[in-house]
DNA sequence: GTTGGACTATGACGTTACGTCACCCTTTAG
DNA sequence: CTAAAGGGTGACGTAACGTCATAGTCCAAC
């Protein structure tokens, strides 16, 4: 009843190398090893191999299989844990797929939105933002915004989309940090927020006070909020706190000045 | 405007090691390398890094990113190819998830089907199969089946499920072979079918003629067909041909004998 | 007895995208 | 001038084997 490696391999539908591998990691030692080093497998080893291969097909990593088979780890709960990981993997795949789709749509000119419509929409979004800025910070701030915007006159649609990607990447990193439990006023968050501040500066001559107040704007302004929320549902609140913390801790904005800003509305 | 490794790493949110890696594989050489070996990155490298990271987040492997950026490979079609691979990955994950769920359900006693119901269902399926065998091959064959079945008297539900897994694994390997374009009468298919034949022999004293006729049974008998089709939609037809080929080429069943079998109905 | 083909064995490298030492050299602030 | 940052180059580890390269073993045929 003893089988050689190649016989077992043929019966089980695996390679000889796989059997050698399983031996070397101690997952499936042969029942007997002849003096010449040849491996021979008996019925118990064949049965164990069946169980190994079943779990392997379910995507369970080999060390986990060893635990389940040897240490009498509960098979059901082990599989349930594994199932949870598979689900997470699938969610990650879905996220990536969504991002790929959006990217393809953007790059391929998005038939549903022509360039004209794109720029019209951009212009509309800008004027809504301008009005909001004027409401909050006064006409001067809105004019500063318009002036900075003029610097983008020569931009192509691709330029905008490239910049959008860059911003989205930053938001993704913030979302990842939030996921890891990073507080919005921690040093790590301030590092990230600094990049946000730098980005904002390129489009708007923000002062410590106006940057502080931006924390409110991204919560209230529908356009801004939805951009951020599209990356992570709970990111707007986190970013708002981070922005205020950055303005206070790194830009020296004092809470007392807050009224000044409000008054300038 | 030149940045050191750590500056670039901080700005882009990657590790220094990653930049060294990208340099070593030629994906992102620094704009300038000082005599002391220090790497310095300029604006073009930062922009390239942005594009690299965007694609990386989309799950594109680094060599593919290099092709896209350097060889002017069409970005959109490259992403579409990538998208197709992601979809395939997700399908694979879904398949595994389904298998895991079925396995968990089986192992945890499947509340929806009690042991009593399980054995009742088993008994029903058996009697349907027995009737089918009697119709096709005569009462003697059906009795042989019953006799073999008695050998499983002491089996627990787990034993049955273990054996079902074994059978399913064989069917999976056949499905994989079929997917690769293996013909059901090729040598490789005969190897696999031999294992099917061995398995059948344990439950039923098949003769070359009856095994040949089993090719029809798995197509016509609803229970058998659905078991096989649940693994792969098009497997029943493939296996039917493989069974007939095996009976002829390995068991020496002659086509002329076919009438004999039919007559015995 | 030997020859040859089939089978077996043991390394060791390759794969993916870096993380993590270990060890050494510059630059810079005090 | 010294010590702390920060930079550099290997080299190993990761998951699960595939794929050589090299060498010993077995068995049937001559």
Image (cartoon, coloured by chain):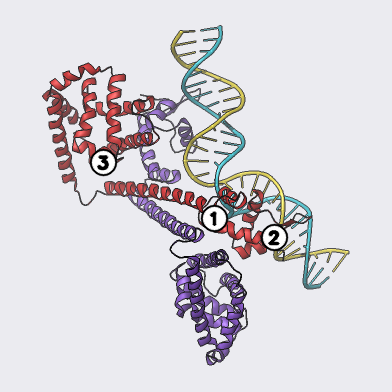
Chain colours: A red, B purple, C yellow, D cyan
Q: Quadrant of residue B264?
A: bottom right
Task: Compare residues B24 and B80 and report the one nearer the observer.
Answer: B80
Q: Position of residue B139 (x, y in %)?
A: 56, 88
Residue A23 visible in the picture = yes
- Residue B148 is left or right of residue B3, and the answer is right
Q: CA distance from mark 2 to mark 1?
A: 20 Å
**Mark 3 surroundings within 10 Å by alpha-carbon count, few (fewer than 14), some (14 through 19), many (20 or more):** few
Q: CA distance from mark 2 to mark 3?
A: 63 Å
Q: Which mark is residue A56?
A: 1
Which dot, 2 or 3, sits closer to the camera? 2
Do callouts 2 and 1 mark residues in contact (Cβ within 8 Å)?
no
- Relative vertical location of residue B160 with respect to residue C18 in this rendering, above or below: below
Q: Quadrant of residue A194?
A: top left
- Quarter of the picture containing the C terminus of chain A is top left
- Residue B25 is left or right of residue B8, and the answer is right
Q: Position of residue B23 (x, y in %)?
A: 47, 34
Which dot, 1 or 3, sits closer to the camera? 1
Q: Which mark is residue A158?
A: 3
Q: CA distance from mark 1 to mark 3?
A: 46 Å
Residue A159 visible in the picture = no
Instruction: Kindly state the secondary structure of the residue where label 1 is placed.
Output: helix
Counting residues from the start of the chain, the first of labels 2 and 1 encountered is: 2
Q: Could you tell me which residue is drawn at 24 percent across and 24 percent down?
A: A212
Farthest front residue in view:
B116
Q: Position of residue B93 (x, y in %)?
A: 44, 55
Q: Mark 1 falls within which chain?
A: A
Q: Quadrant of residue A178?
A: top left
Q: Which mark is residue A68?
A: none
Q: Which residue is mark 2?
A: A41
Counting residues from the start of the chain, the first of labels 2 and 3 encountered is: 2
Instruction: Kindly state the secondary structure of the residue where label 3 is placed.
Output: helix
Q: Are marks 2 and 1 on the same chain?
A: yes
């Amino acid at each position: 009843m003893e089988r050689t490696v190649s016989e077992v391999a043929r019966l089980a539908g695996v390679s000889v190398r796989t059997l050698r591998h399983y031996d070397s990691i101690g997952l499936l030692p042969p029942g007997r090893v002849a003096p010449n080093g040849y491996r021979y497998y008996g019925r118990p080893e064949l049965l164990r191999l069946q169980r190994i291969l079943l779990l392997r097909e379910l995507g369970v990593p080999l060390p986990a299989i060893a635990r389940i088979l040897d240490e009498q780890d509960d098979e059901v709960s082990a599989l349930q844990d594994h199932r949870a990981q598979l689900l997470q993997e699938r969610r990650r795949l879905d996220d990536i797929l969504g991002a790929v789709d959006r990217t393809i749509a953007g790059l391929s000119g998005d038939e549903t939105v022509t360039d004209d419509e794109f720029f019209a929409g951009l212009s509309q979004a800008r004027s809504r933002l301008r009005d909001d800025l004027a409401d909050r910070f006064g006409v001067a701030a809105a004019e500063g915004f318009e002036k900075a915007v003029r610097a983008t006159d020569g931009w192509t649609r691709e330029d905008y989309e490239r910049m959008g990607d860059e911003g989205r990447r930053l938001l993704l990193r913030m979302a990842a940090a939030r996921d890891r439990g990073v507080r919005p006023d921690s040093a790590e968050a301030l590092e990230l927020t600094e990049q946000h501040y730098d980005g904002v500066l390129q489009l708007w001559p923000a002062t410590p006070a106006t940057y502080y107040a931006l924390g409110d704007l991204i919560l209230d302004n529908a356009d801004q909020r939805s951009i951020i929320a599209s990356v992570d549902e709970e990111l707007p609140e986190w970013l708002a706190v981070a922005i205020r913390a950055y303005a206070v801790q790194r830009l020296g904005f004092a809470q007392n000045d807050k009224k000044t800003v409000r008054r300038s509305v």
